[in-house]
Amino acid sequence: MSTTDIGIDLGTANIVMTYGRKGVVLSEPSVIAYNKCTQRILAVGSEAYQMIGRNPAYIDVVRPMAEGVISDDLLTQCMIREFLQKICGHQLIKPRMIICVPAFITDLEKRAVGDAVMSAGCRKAYLIDEPIAAMLGAGINIGRARGHMVVDIGGGTTDIAIVSMNGIVTSHSVKSAGSQIDKAIMKYMANHYKLLIGEQTAEYVKKTLTNLYDPREDVTLSVKGRSIIRGLPDMIELNEMELYTAIEDEIFAILEAIRKVLEETPPELVGDIHENGILLTGGGALLGGLRELIHRTLNVNCVMAKDTMHCVAKGTGLAFQKINHLLDGFEGVTIYKYR
């Protein structure tokens, strides 16, 4: 691995970067703010995230990634370029990059990711599937003839895969993930309490109050927002049971996706998974009671990755050492206009 090689987990909610042998050097929200009048970039990452819901009309605060893929090419290029300058400065040597992408994106979506990083200033780009990167980041030896299962719950998608002998045996991806859970909470509050809350509040409620295994009515959290009826500030007490009701459809969509992958897996590998357990990665793996719920529902043990938030990015960085071995879920980017 070169000291200038960069690994990028280009997520819907967060972007995480590794730099050479330094490991993870950047982890910030995938948000960019720009002035619509002057077309100037004002802020990216954490600074832009603080502006969500607080910006005047002439400033746009945007997430250029949606459901694991690029929704705005130009803003994504600008965001990546700003982050690269943060970690590299204005160096003359163009780095190699490996970018992590969901396993089920189309060739067109892959090309959009390749375009974005090539135009941001890299010399050579590779794409790696999230399940492969997650396994590498967790320190699992995927080269052996043993089955390992990973469930990566990110901001835009949940990727589930069975990996053996450096390749993906079977996999599935669903849109139920962090952002959809936040939207479900916002919808529940609007429908049941006539209270409008913002994206940041919904995320805070999700992180603080979620209990998927044994929700209780006596554990509550004060939620502030704007009353739809009166149009004035209001506050309600939300309990764990109500939050479970709000997000259970999204959670059980993830469980059904896991069940589907297990049903399509060869019996020998299912035996390996029963022994090894399911590896949980991504920010969504931190939801309270998720491991216990999966075990109770599917009768399979779960193992939490040591650094769930940065596990995929670490694996992306480690992939530089295995470029010649990862023939499945890994490919070089060919962008015709840069030849």
Image (cartoon, rainbow, N blue to C red):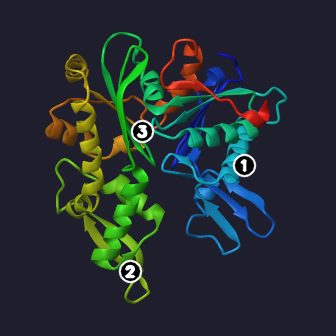
User: Badge 1: few (under 14), some or many (20 or more) residues near its Cα, within 10 Å?
Assistant: some
In the rendered image, which quarter is residue 20 located in?
Answer: top right
Q: Going 42% across and 19% down the picture, which residue do you hit?
A: 167
Secondary structure found at label 2? strand
Provide the residue designation for mark 3. Answer: 282
Ranked by sequence position, the earlier of labels 3 and 1 is 1
Mark seen at residue 78: 1
* Left or right of residue 133: residue 84: right
Provide the residue designation for mark 2. Answer: 234
Where is 81 relative to 247, above or below?
above
| Amino acid type, callout 2 | Asp
Residue at the farthest top position: 144
| Labels 3 & 2 near each other (Cβ < 8 A) | no
Where is 75 relative to 24, above or below?
below
Q: CA distance from mark 3 to mark 1?
A: 25 Å
Secondary structure found at label 1? helix
The reply to whether residue 161 is in sight is no
Secondary structure found at label 3? loop
User: Badge 3: few (under 14), some or many (20 or more) residues near its Cα, within 10 Å?
Assistant: many
In the rendered image, which quarter is residue 278 located in?
Answer: top left
- Residue toward you, 129 or 182: 129
